[in-house]
Amino acid sequence: MANQEEVILSLGRSPLFELAQELKARLTNFGGWEMPVQFVGISKEHEAVRNAAGMFDISHMGKFTLQGKNLISQLQLLVPSDFSRLQAGQAQYTVLLNPQGGIIDDIIFYYQGENAAGEQRGVMIVNAATTHKDKAWLLQHLDQNEIQFQDLSPKKVLIAVQGPKAITILQTLVQEDLTSVKAFGHLEGTVLGKPAFLARTGYTGEDGFEVMIDLDAGVELWRSLLNAGVIPCGLGARDTLRLEAAMALYGQDIDDTTTPLEAGLGWLVHLDSKGDFIGRSVLEQQKAAGVERRLVGLQMQGRNIARHGYQVLSTGAVVGEVTSGTLSPTLGYPIALAYVPTELATVSQQLEVEIRGKAYPAVVVKRPFYRSKNRVTQ
């Protein structure tokens, strides 16, 4: 069995790892990467994003570029969303599906339009722990004679700058006008005089940008944002922020055994406007018959926190399982996501969660738990 030192040495490290060490970040193993879980404290980092500006090193995520004359039509076969709707400069959050309708990964595809040769171009960002799996799946199903696929994962830094003051601060370092970019819009721009890809997307429920840039420029960008007063944030705050916004975490809330219809991601499934895709027949059957279980939001009726893996009860019987849970720093009470039978998935449904052998009351509530007043819409 490998000792702890060998395990640490085998973990991936971001190009910004040494900067995290300089700031005395507390580190953890996340999806095979040694990542900061917190810098100054989860509550302070969470509050910075909700009220001012925070930044996250998300360089561990997979970063692909794709190019080819039939790129969109080929990708259409792999996702339930209709990519033909996308205009250059727009993006789509969606999922890669297996033949059973299960979610291989949730992704964002940024469509960059056609180049001078008439080839369609795009950027795809995927989860860190599934990067190799996703790459293999894409290469298996895309015609490599037509599509040029490039994995930029180790060659680029990815920094998310999030919060109501994020864009104002970031703008001082960016040549292009960021306010002209709509939600889920993106552009190829200039940051600190260097080429960069900037997207008005994020995983916090707040407004902001994600910036993909070369390694050296990424280090410079991190230091510049730090000097401008942006608070560095770790995975702890990233988790509480995304859970308040009811954004799914792959491997917990969604996985290859859950379908988008079960996970409350039916808005990604465009059965009426597109043709065939992997997993379509399963989703058609589920839509016609109705799903047997749904992912719901729970609000605990006390201070006890429902954690991942805890059992959900109804009239004393186990009916489901919590996938994510935390004490919401913004709302001040415990919140959770859980799969329960469809008949128990209605808002105001009374349930219980078993915590250390005792049942505590919970109620199904509308998602998201928190909606920012500062976030722009598409």
Image (spheres, grey):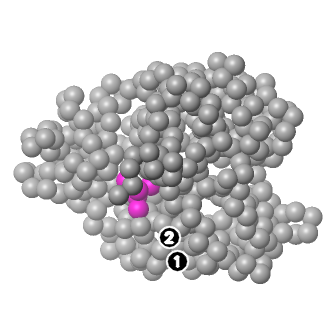
Q: Is residue 257 magenta?
A: no
Residue occupying image coordinates x 28% and y 33%: 334
Closer to the camera in the image, 160 or 59: 59
> Measured along the vertical axis of the image, is residue 368 above or below residue 301?
below
Q: Is residue 6 visible?
A: yes
Q: For mark 2, give the secondary structure.
A: strand
- Magenta range is 250-255
Q: Quadrant of the C terminus?
A: top right
Q: Position of residue 302 (x, y in %)?
A: 19, 29
Identity of the amino acid at label 1? Ile
Residue occupying image coordinates x 73% and y 61%: 65
Q: Quadrant of the N terminus?
A: bottom left
Q: Residues within 10 Å of mark 1 (few under 14, many from 20)?
A: some
Identity of the amino acid at label 2? Leu
CA gap, disc 2 to disc 1? 6 Å
Q: Residues within 10 Å of mark 2 (few under 14, many from 20)?
A: many
Label the magenta part by its dominant secondary structure: loop
Closer to the camera in the image, 349 or 53: 53
Residue 97 disc label: 2
Q: Is residue 348 left or right of residue 95?
A: left
Q: Position of residue 245 (x, y in %)?
A: 45, 39
- Does the residue at mark 2 contact the one at mark 1 (Cβ under 8 Å)? yes
Q: Position of residue 36 (x, y in %)?
A: 50, 35
Q: Is residue 253 magenta?
A: yes
Q: Quadrant of residue 115?
A: bottom right
Q: Position of residue 132 (x, y in %)?
A: 56, 64
Q: Is residue 299 left or right of residue 196?
A: left
Q: For mark 1, give the secondary structure.
A: loop
Residue 278 disc label: 1
Q: Quadrant of residue 272?
A: bottom right
Q: Is residue 268 visible?
A: no
Residue occupying image coordinates x 77% and y 81%: 145
